[in-house]
Amino acid sequence: MTRRTNHLLLSIALFLSVGSAAASSPARAGLVDRPLQPYQSDLLDVAFKAASAFPVHPHLKNRARVQELVFDACLELDQPCRARSCAEKMSTWRRGAAYADLAFYGAQHGAKEEAQKDADLALRLAREGSADEDSQDWQVDRIRSKVARVQLWLGQGEQVASLSEGLEPSESGRVDEVRAMVGDEKVIDATLSALDSAVSSGNFDATRNALDASARLYQRFYADAEKRSRIEGKIKGSWEHMPVAVRLDLMVEMIDSAFDHQDPAKALDLVNEARHFVDDYQWTAETLIQQAARLAERRFRAGDHQKARAEADAAWSRYEEEREKIVDIYRAGALRPLAEAYQAFGDKAAALKVYKRAVEEGVHNPNSRPRAEDLAATCCSMAVRRVEPDAELRARLLQVCDGLKEPW
């Protein structure tokens, strides 16, 4: 065991001793799942069944990774109890990470006691998992950073400092993002100053973290036009050396912030600006289709319906033209954002058509691993976007799931 691992475990042990009093309290907020349509529940069931079809040996890591995808969809749909059921069946370090995410969900929804219990459990799992010879420090860091953001949300500064100590930049950014969400107005200067320092250092992870935290500031202070303009200018002036995909992700976050504040005019301006990233840079065919689809969806939301439809249709035609250039395991992933866009347009028939195509493209590979991944992802997408499968598609989803077997 490395010296650094010993330090990490000491930090966890100290945290658990501090948190034990709160964790021992019998009071719980009793988070409950929001009602789902029966088909959404069925889709999540199929997705988790597909994720759990992976044989434990030698696919334990892949199994947990795909189960985590379903877990995330459950939380997105406000299904904390269903998500907990998923977490209980997960293994590897991702189980601890899932409980940390449950803790953050609980903290955000006012379930302080429940959040504390889940945070304690996450750290215990991290401590136990670190004894595994295959455990890596970054995995423990991931759980620590996720728990630290819980404590930051709950206002427990001392515990945040203990858990954050020694985190690598690739993980500390999770804490910085939450700090940008809950700190007083001084957090603006602190975050933007950290961004300047990160850019000067040339450290990719530190710069990405500071940009992500700045995007949280943009969301939080959007209503103040002066502060919003300052933050937006700093983000755009600091990303020169970041990959285009990162810049586009940040643009999408700012677009969504505009929607959150009922500002479709600003959202459309940002969509038009972001579209240049799609048009002016070289992308693989599958990535180009994905990016075009998610911007078309946002263009539609901003009120530019005709052009949004034209962009989505062009992405669909591009897929048909370049399908053979796309590796088979990436084809369904290219189509899912396009199906989501059509659903956002209110064109359920087109969305269902593209989802059906995604299912068929997802079974093209003879190995079950990519089949299971695509099936789980497609079912989660349909559940989250509220796309009800017809009888034909429902039968096909079950058939694909039942057919997951050797070779993997």
Image: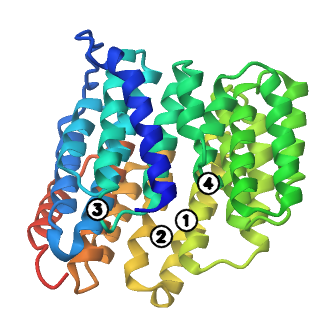
Question: Above or below — where is 278 with respect to 32?
Answer: below
- Look at discs 4 and 1 and give the one toward the viewer: 4
The residue indicated by pointer 4 is 168
Q: Are marks 2 and 4 in contact (CB under 8 Å)?
A: no
For mark 2, does the 10 Å Cα neighbourhood hold few (<14), some (14 to 19), or many (20 or more) residues? Answer: many
**Residue situated in front as seen by the camera: 80 or 258:** 80
- Mark 1 and mark 2 lie on one chain; the one further toward the N terminus is 1
Image location (x, y in percent) of residue 6? 44, 51
The residue indicated by pointer 2 is 334
Looking at the rendered structure, the secondary structure element under dot 2 is helix
Residue at x 24%, y 64% (from the top left corner)? 63
- Mark 2 and mark 3 lie on one chain; the one further toward the N terminus is 3
Mark 2 to mark 3 CA distance (whole Å): 37 Å
Give the residue type that dot 3 points to: Asp
- Mark 4 and mark 1 lie on one chain; the one further toward the N terminus is 4
- Look at discs 3 and 1 and give the one toward the viewer: 3
Looking at the rendered structure, the secondary structure element under dot 3 is loop
Q: Quadrant of residue 261?
A: top right
- Which of the image's four quarters has the N terminus? bottom left
Q: Are marks 1 and 2 in contact (CB under 8 Å)?
A: yes
Does residue 18 appear to the left or right of 293 in the view shown?
Answer: left
Residue at x 39%, y 71% (from the top left corner)? 332
Does residue 194 appear to the left or right of 302 in the view shown?
Answer: right
Mark 2 to mark 4 CA distance (whole Å): 32 Å
Tell me if residue 346 can be seen: no
For mark 4, does the 10 Å Cα neighbourhood hold few (<14), some (14 to 19), or many (20 or more) residues? Answer: some
Looking at the rendered structure, the secondary structure element under dot 1 is helix
Looking at the rendered structure, the secondary structure element under dot 4 is loop
Q: Quadrant of residue 118?
A: top left
The residue indicated by pointer 3 is 132
